[in-house]
Image: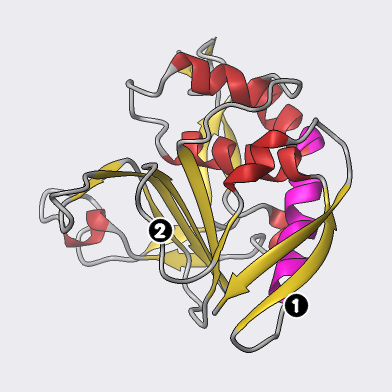
């Protein structure tokens, strides 16, 4: 039996969770290089791993996978597509119609999936993601989105940022895919130099569409 990192129930088979969602183009064959390809003790040493379904993890139970897909993923996909269309130069104000809480909970859910082997994910964080009506919490789990020119897929899980010892920062998750990088960090002090912070998306009701004014600095 395997344990779902979101609901913590045991399941014989865990379903594949795409990160980013298939609706953002993550649905084709990939050759992946990761830490196993550099580990002499791994079966994948000096080899590329073949992902036929796109990039992600065999991590969630079928129920949680379907719930996330119906509750949050469509709005996250639309928001990312709208964000990619921001082509201004310098610091400007833009307006995007979106369902903010749905968007940020999709990102939090992906963060949990990336850390699916981590037994220390707070239970109240998991419950926050599962219950769509919960809001106005986890403002310290800050989310930044940045446009990139990179064409790679990359995930990184929970770790400490060691290059700023006077202000320790927990990197909860980093999600990078063609054109976009998303960072989830646990810090109230640090401000990333580039990109858009959407942490205040926690302050909206579930499934309510709003026009969001954003100041985005490239």
Decide if residue 128 is on the left or right side of residue 156.
Answer: right
Crowding around mark 2 (Cα neighbors within 10 Å: few <14, some 14 to 19, many 20+) is: few
Q: For residue 110, what is the image quadrant?
A: top right
Q: Nearer the viewer, mark 1 or mark 2?
A: 2
Q: Residue at x 89, y 45 (%)?
A: 209
Q: Secondary structure at mark 1?
A: loop
In the rendered image, which quarter contains the N terminus?
top left
Residue nearer the viewer, 154 or 136: 136
Question: Which residue is at a point 76% across and 71% down the rendered structure image?
Answer: 94
Residue 180 position within the rendered picture, expressed as x and y whole percent measured from the top left: 56, 68
Tell me the crowding category of disc 1: few under 14, some 14 to 19, or many 20 or more residues within 10 angstroms, Cα based. Answer: few
Foreground of the two, 75 or 178: 75
Q: What segment is highlighted magenta in the picture? A: 70-84
Q: Which x, y percent locates residue 85?
A: 75, 77
Mark 2 lies on a secondary structure that is: loop
User: Which mark is drawn over residue 51?
Assistant: none
Q: Give the residue at x 48% y 23%.
A: 5
Left or right: residue 6 compared with residue 160: right
Asked if the residue at tag 2 contacts the one at tag 1, i.e. Cβ–Cβ closer than 8 Å, the answer is no
Residue 217 lies in quadrant: bottom right
Measured Cα–Cα span from mark 1 to mark 2: 24 Å
111 is within the stretch colored magenta? no
Residue 201 in the image: above or below residue 71: below
Sequence-first disc among 1 and 2: 1
Disc number for residue 85: 1
Kindly identify which residue carries mark 2: 191
Q: Main secondary structure of the magenta part?
A: helix
Q: Is residue 85 left or right of residue 50?
A: right
């Amino acid at each position: 039996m395997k344990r779902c990192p979101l609901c913590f129930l045991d399941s014989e088979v865990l379903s594949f969770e795409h990160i980013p969602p298939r609706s953002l183009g993550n649905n084709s064959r990939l050759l992946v290089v990761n830490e196993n390809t550099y580990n002499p003790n791994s079966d994948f040493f000096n080899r590329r791993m073949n992902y036929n379904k796109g990039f992600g993890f065999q991590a969630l139970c079928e129920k949680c996978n379907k719930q996330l897909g119906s509750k949050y993923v469509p709005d996250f996909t639309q928001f990312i597509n709208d964000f990619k269309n921001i082509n201004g130069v310098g610091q400007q104000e833009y307006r995007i119609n979106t369902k903010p809480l749905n968007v940020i909970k999709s990102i939090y859910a992906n963060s949990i999936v990336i850390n699916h082997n981590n037994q220390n994910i707070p239970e109240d964080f998991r419950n926050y993601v599962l219950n769509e009506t919960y809001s106005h919490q986890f403002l310290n789990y800050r989310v930044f989105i940045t446009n990139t020119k990179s064409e790679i897929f990359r995930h990184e899980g929970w770790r400490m940022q060691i290059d700023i010892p006077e202000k320790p920062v927990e990197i909860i998750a980093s999600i990078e895919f063609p054109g976009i990088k998303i960072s989830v960090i646990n810090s109230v002090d640090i401000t990333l130099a580039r990109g858009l912070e959407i942490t205040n998306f926690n302050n909206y009701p579930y499934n309510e569409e709003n026009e969001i004014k954003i100041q985005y600095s490239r």
